[in-house]
Image (tube, rainbow, N blue to C red):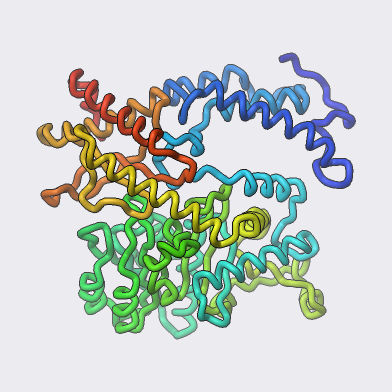
Amino acid sequence: MKGTDVSWNDSAASLAGGVDGPGLLRDLTGVVLDALADGARDRGGPLPHGGPDAVQADVRKVWPMALPEHGTGADEALRTLVHAVAQGSADPADPHCVAHLHCPPLAVAAAADLAAAVLNPSMDSWDQAPAATVIEEGVATALAGLVYPRAVHADALITSGGTESNLVALLLARERARDRGAAALQVVCGANAHHSVARAAWTLGLPTPLVVPCADGRMGPAALDRLLAVHGRTAPVLVVATAGTTDQGAIDPLPELAEVVARYGAELHVDAAYGGMLLFSDRHTHRLTGLESAASVTLDMHKLGWQPVAAGVLAVRDRRMLEPLALQADYLNADDDTETGLPDLLGRSIRTSRRPDALKIAVTLRALGRRGLGDLVDRCISQAEEFAQAVAQHPGLRLHPDGVGISTVLFRPLAADDLPGNEGDELVAAVRRELLSDGQAVLGRARSGGPEGDTRLWLKATLLNPRTGPADLDRLLGLVADSASVACRTPHTFGEEP
């Protein structure tokens, strides 16, 4: 479309806030919603067809340059780019989009996020976010109480996700070690730990984490005991356990690990970015027994909590543990302002400017309550259990021997087991890529032990859509089985390194 000069009266240069902004935004939101619907309809599945080259060509066709000399106006820009992104997206609301911890956000949470974007409070000083400060404090208190129901001084920070939460947890543990006169903090984690743990240690200048082998995908207490018997007396130790691994949804045996950690005078941090939302479920919360033994806990509500990214949380057993984050900048938290009662927000994050992500969480908690969210958690877990049963009964597929991990199911074509050497894994990888390229399904991949103890490549389905039905999952299994059958009849299509 030919560019035009945009005047101050054009909607592209108007503001979203104030008294008049919502009226204009209502019209623009209509354009966005139509473009979202049209894009999803034109995509026709969980993923665009054709792979990276096709997606790039489609986007570049309607968006040849990022910075044109003249603007096209708000309606055209929104209609064109939102449609292009929607048509070219992996849609987590599609029942065949199950590769990652990538949830379909609740409509009520997305609507609340729109309000947050319009009001645009920055959570680094009270005078930028008066009411949002109250909302964040209430959400933090509620979620900290969920993790630590018997702790009097529990608190929580709102973060950008598990990576930031784990980084801050290690930072706070390092500062506690320094307060005790230690020269260093030694991090210990399982081989199943999220990569952000090692990256956080590297970022903070800590020694490389010591890794505990995980024979069945979980950190074993005996293996941890053996490692701490050698290394647990030389420096303060932070043991990082996992409640919900990204590959299998496995939950470490938290009570037993906590006993070992206490025996050596170490501290425990639990990365429960995936599994932490089991706390909402009456049926499954027992699987997190021992969680409150941790000094700190990572949660992510943009995983099994159905929030738009980002919605991370770091809960701590005692708010005094957050004191190392304190920072003074006169233009944000002058001493005399703080002394007269203005809240100090700089110690609530390692970031300065940050969005009011607590608003969408607060709206969701109010709209659904703990029981409503727990029901959604239960549905996804039940789906995964039914899906696993369907895999086990399918004549062409095999279920991973460890079964379901929270809402994650690993499986692979039986034909892959009959192939020599690495060809079985190559078949699994080829099936996944074929379904991606065709835009039919978004499945993940994970390496895990096979029945003979060897490591094999598995397809991974992580079910986070509470509206997915049995028929949707049966069709997904049919797609996998058909793709594997075709690949087996056409050798060399799966000869790439997986």
Query: Can you say whether 161 is above or below 57 in the image?
Result: below
Pinpoint residue 5: horizontal percent, then vertical percent: 83, 22
Front residue of this view, candidates 320 and 143:
143
Pinpoint residue 308: horizontal percent, then vertical percent: 58, 47
The structure residue drawn at horizontal position 36% and vertical position 79%, both measured from the top left corner, is 266
Is residue 269 rendered to the left or right of residue 19? Answer: left
Front residue of this view, candidates 254 and 77:
254
Pinpoint residue 258: horizontal percent, then vertical percent: 34, 76
Q: Residue furthest top?
A: 2
Front residue of this view, candidates 480 and 434:
480
Tell me the quarter of the image containing the C terminus. Answer: top left
The image quarter in which residue 69 lies: top right
Query: Can you say whether 48 is above or below 359 in the image?
Result: above
Tell me the quarter of the image containing the N terminus. Answer: top right
The image quarter in which residue 313 lies: bottom right
The image quarter in which residue 418 lies: top left
Q: Is residue 448 visible?
A: yes
Q: Is residue 203 visible?
A: no
